[in-house]
Image (cartoon, rainbow, N blue to C red):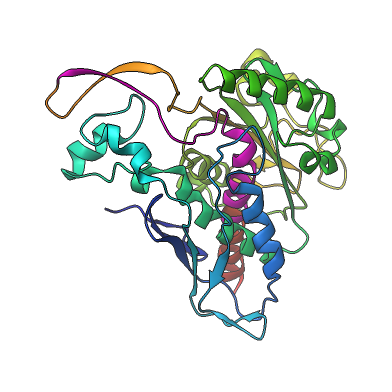
Amino acid sequence: MAGNSFGTLFRLTTFGESHGRALGGVIDGCPAGIVLDLNAIQNELNRRKPGQSAIVTQRKEPDTVEIYSGLFEGKTTGTPIGFAIHNTNQKSKDYSHIKDSYRPSHADYVYDKKYGFRDYRGGGRSSARETASRVVAGAIAKQFLKGIEINAFVSQVGELKVQRPYQELDFKEIEKNPVRCADPEMAKQMEDYIKSIKKEGDTIGGVITCVAKNVPIGLGEPVFDKLHAELGKAMLSINAVKGFEYGSGFDGVLMKGSAHNDQFNKDGTTKTNLSGGVQGGISNGMDIYFNVAFKPVATVLQGYETINKKGEKVKTQGKGRHDPCVVPRAVPIVEAMTALILADYYLLARVNKV
């Protein structure tokens, strides 16, 4: 199986399955001499881990990260950083009913057809639990990117949508509610709605907005390696993501060019930022902001019809512990992938200056 590595200079390779012994990764290219705050890394994992509130999966995992290499006396050595997160609360029997059948809108069927074999326990390698390794790497990248602020928050759940622009929101509110919404009033509505969806044995999707501030001018490469293109790829690599838009996004098609153009100030900043902090594929020093759309979790705790390996129609029902809405736990994942992209481009920019 290919496709387990991400990045060019700041490069992450992950390993592990949802119900295996452990998940983990190897980070290559992290510069030497960076003082790592291990508590900050663990805090990022705690934001992603299951069982943290009533509106997420109740699988209980401590998600404690252990770093095995690349660190000496609290500083990075420049050598590969190896780490692992051990699984402690697997309930593989919850998936025995799908051993010979395929769940709709999951990777079960295509994995079986592509590889001729699949780990049906929680989806194996296709499980969103793999993203825990990304969060560790992103937390390290954040500490490398001194001065750059990356904040993501839930801006929509179903039809419930934050109406105010991000500039009017207080990012300190994000961690004060289980939905991780920067609007306290909307957060309560979203929480109640997710709880009602959970009682129905169903799921709902949502949108995460991410804002990166203080990004220096010049990150990104023209043509095929545009900054926004790589951000899009990073977000679309996250489980359940169905859409990505940056800057004005799809709303930009409603505007005329004369209104959409970001006019310059004398200092090179722009009066508006419909470009989303990226022009010509290169960061322009303004805020980078984008939206990431997540579909409803495919596992619903209701009866449904599917097919088995023989192509026969069978009836089954979702079982186990699953998120009724994935976006609250996906917030740190979106931040992590953003940090990985910016760290990679920062190093590329530094190399190009040598």
Extreme left residue here?
Answer: 310
Residue at 56% x, 65% y is 65
Q: How many numbered circles does the render carry?
A: 0
Answer above or below: position of 315 versus 227.
Answer: above
Left or right, residue 80 beside residue 98: right
Residue 14, percent across and down?
Answer: 42, 59
Looking at the image, which is closer to me, 290 or 220? 290
Looking at the image, which is closer to me, 259 or 191? 191
> For residue 155, which quarter of the picture?
top right
Answer above or below: position of 260 versus 265.
Answer: above
Residue 116, percent across and down?
Answer: 15, 43
Looking at the image, which is closer to me, 326 or 284? 326
Residue 1, percent across and down?
Answer: 26, 53
Residue at 56% x, 22% y is 204
> For residue 152, which quarter of the picture?
top right
Left or right, residue 25 beside residue 66: left
Residue at 35% x, 31% y is 106
Q: Please identify the quadrant where the C terminus is shown.
A: bottom right
Extreme bottom residue here?
Answer: 73
Looking at the image, which is closer to me, 105 or 146? 105
Left or right, residue 206 beside residue 233: right
Left or right, residue 42 beside residue 85: right
Residue at 47% x, 48% y is 129
Q: Is residue 112 magenta?
A: no
Q: Which residues are magenta?
A: 312-340
> For residue 315, which quarter of the picture?
top left
Residue 173, percent across and down?
Answer: 83, 39
Q: Is residue 323 magenta?
A: yes
